[in-house]
Amino acid sequence: MKSEAMRMATWCSRSFSIIKCPCSEYGPLLLPNNSLHFSRRSSTALLISSLPFSFLCPSPPPVLARDRRFNSSTIPIQDYLTSLDGLKYYDLVEGKGPIAEKGSTVQVHFDCIYRGITAVSSRESKLLAGNRIIAQPYEFTVGSPPGKERKREFVDNPNGLFSAQAAPKPPPALYSVTEGMRTGGKRTVIVTPDKGYGQKGMNEIPPGATFQLNIELLQVVPTEK
């Protein structure tokens, strides 16, 4: 029995070479010696085929994967610009359409977000004749006093009759910080209490709170000539 084991060991030492994988997590590899007429190319192919697929095609590091997912909370504060009235804003998408200038009538979607919760949004407007929620764009004049447009009683749209007075109330910051945006653009704004909902708060936004305002400029309404 012992002699049989010795003969087997001798045969293995003559027929194969033991090569340690350069990566420490893999064990030694057995490769045939030249006496078995394995070419260098064949040996290399055998070595490659014995390695795990993940070693040959490593997946991208988790950090790179996270970088592909855009999140406004990851934007450094120094990258924000400052508006004339002191609001910090950052353009997520520049837009390519007409520019919203002071005095322009625009349609936007806006979302007020506090600690990850959407507290106020134009995408959650109610129809007058029922409790259905619709995404009704908010229309106002850039640079106008806040709330002027809410005096409209009814707005007719394809989804039904809509009450402008019942529309979600935007923060005062919306009326000024939209200036300079292009149609199709998306802007995120850090709204302080004096430009937000003040000491009253709104829904989940508590009194005196700073929150994030996201704006999407849908249209600059052409002026009637």
Image: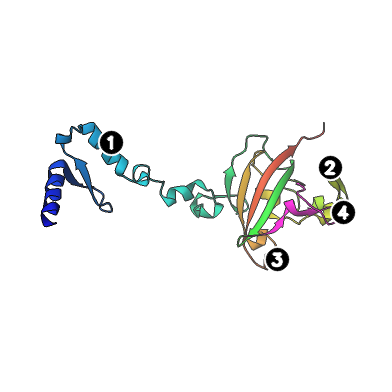
Residue type at mark 4: give it: Leu
Secondary structure under badge 2?
Answer: loop
Q: Which residue is mark 2?
A: 158
Circle 3 or circle 1, nearest the eye? 1
Residue 36 location (% of width, % of height): 17, 35
User: Furthest residue to the front?
Assistant: 1
**Separation (CA) of disc 3 from disc 4:** 25 Å
Q: Nearer the viewer, residue 19 or 84?
A: 19
| C-alpha separation, residue under disc 3 versus residue under disc 1 | 68 Å
Q: Are marks 3 and 2 in contact (CB under 8 Å)?
A: no
Which residues, given as a range, are shown in magenta? Answer: 117-138
Q: Which residue is mark 3?
A: 201
Residue 200 has which mark?
none
Q: Quadrant of the C terminus?
A: top right
Give me the C-alpha separation between circle 4 and circle 2.
13 Å
Disc with the residue nearer the chain's start (1 vs 4): 1
- Give the labeled residue for mark 1: 45
Q: Label 1 crowding class (10 Å Cα cut-off): few <14, some 14-19, many 20+?
A: few
**x%, y% of residue 75?**
51, 52
Q: Which mark is residue 128?
A: 4
| Residue 121 counted in the magenta span | yes
Find numbered disc 1 in the image and state the secondary structure of the residue it sits on: helix
- For badge 3, the amino acid type reads Gly
Q: Nearer the viewer, mark 3 or mark 4?
A: 4
Q: Quadrant of residue 224?
A: top right
Three-letter code for the amino acid on which mark 2 is drawn: Pro
* In front: label 1 or label 4: 1
The alpha-carbon separation of the residues under discs 3 and 2 comes to 32 Å
Q: Earlier in the sequence, mark 2 or mark 1?
A: 1
